[in-house]
Image (cartoon, rainbow, N blue to C red):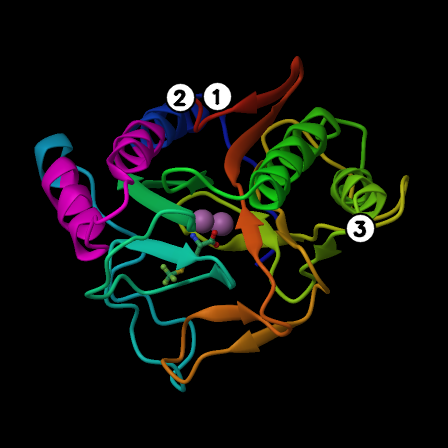
Amino acid sequence: MGIVLKSRDEIRIMREAGRHAAEVLQILADAVRPGLNVLELDRIVRKEFKKRGVESPFLNYQPRSDVPPYPSTVCVSINAQIVHGIPGNRELAEGDIVSMDLGTIYKGYVGDTAVTVPCGTVRPEAQHLIDVTRESLARAIQAATAGNRLGDVGHAVESLAKQHGYGVVRKYVGHGVGRSMHEDPSVPNYGEPGKGKPLKPGMVIAIEPMLNQGTGETREDADGWTVWTADGSLSAHFEHTIAITPDGPEILTLL
Ligand code: MF3
Ligand code: CO
Ligand code: CO
């Protein structure tokens, strides 16, 4: 299927889906501390979703038959884990950097958002990676205006990463969002200005830079889901769901 443009009414609903995702992700971010069992993050999500009438697009998600269904409501990726980490019986430690990715389904529409947060005090190098990755998302969002192209969005991430010597993950990309979590188009975190598909009002996309301290190369875990940096270096990940409007990009997953 090609790119599905959303009506103003659909974007109104997606704003609600996005707000639930943003609010629950903030609750998770506030819960992160040394000694927290990662399983508790999934428990918090289940409780909050139930209260809000939200469902999870992650739980039992199975993009291909050769991977197991995803067993949780949240992805928690720690240190050299990039994305899709499965919450397990593990305690967070002081100095960890913790990437959390959360999806909602509300009134039939998906919100998708992620942050990386420090657990307690982290090394300055780790904090810098987090800060640059957050900034790369901000710049990519600024570039996501109608009339610009996907290459402009990807270039915003890639150029900032390069300035700081960080590797851009190329194997995993952002995506269109709507009734499904993953729709067309793919939204890479690299590209050439002026190239790629044009952005149009009514498009809703998830932009999600993943930056590594080392190279952008990845390694998949035997669990079928967790993605690691190939060189064992730290990785950070931020994501927002963005609607392209005639007045500019609107972040649907902002608090
Ligand atoms: N939310 C992820 C993304 O940003 C996808 C997670 S799929 C899961 O595209 F199954 F791992 F949850
Ligand atoms: Co996500
Ligand atoms: Co996404």
Residue span colored magenta: 21-49
Asked if marks 1 and 3 touch (Cβ < 8 Å), the reply is: no
Q: Can you tell which quarter of the image residue 141 is in?
A: top right
Q: Looking at the picture, does residue 170 appear above or below residue 26?
A: below
Label 1 element class: helix
Point out the image quarter for the N terminus: bottom right
Tell me the distance, in whole angstroms, between the alpha carbons under discs 1 and 3.
Answer: 40 Å
Picture residue at 33% right of the left edge, 35% below the top: 29
Q: Quadrant of the C terminus?
A: top left
Q: CA distance from mark 2 to mark 3?
A: 39 Å
235 in relation to 115, above or below: below
**Residue 29 magenta-highlighted:** yes
Q: Which mark is residue 147?
A: none
Asked if disc 2 is less than 8 Å from ligand 3, the answer is no
The answer to which image quadrant residue 130 occupies is: top right
State the residue position of label 3.
165
Residue behind mark 1? 8
Crowding at dot 1, Cα within 10 Å, few <14 / some 14-19 / many 20+, comes out as few
Does 186 sit left or right of 44 as displayed? right
Position of 102 compared to 36: left or right? right
Q: Position of residue 69 (x, y in %)?
A: 29, 73
Left or right, residue 208 beside residue 170: left
Mark 1 or mark 3: which is in front? Answer: 3
Decide: few, some or many residues near mark 3? Use Cα within 10 Å; few <14, some 14-19, many ≥20: some
Q: Residue 34 in the image: x percent, y percent?
A: 27, 45
Question: In the image, what residue occupies the spot 38% across and 63% down?
Answer: 85
- Nearest the eye: 25 or 52: 25
Contact? badges 2 and 1 (CB < 8 Å): yes
Magenta region includes residue 105: no
* x, y percent for residue 210: 61, 52
Residue at label 2? 12
How far, Cα to Cα, is label 2 from label 1?
6 Å
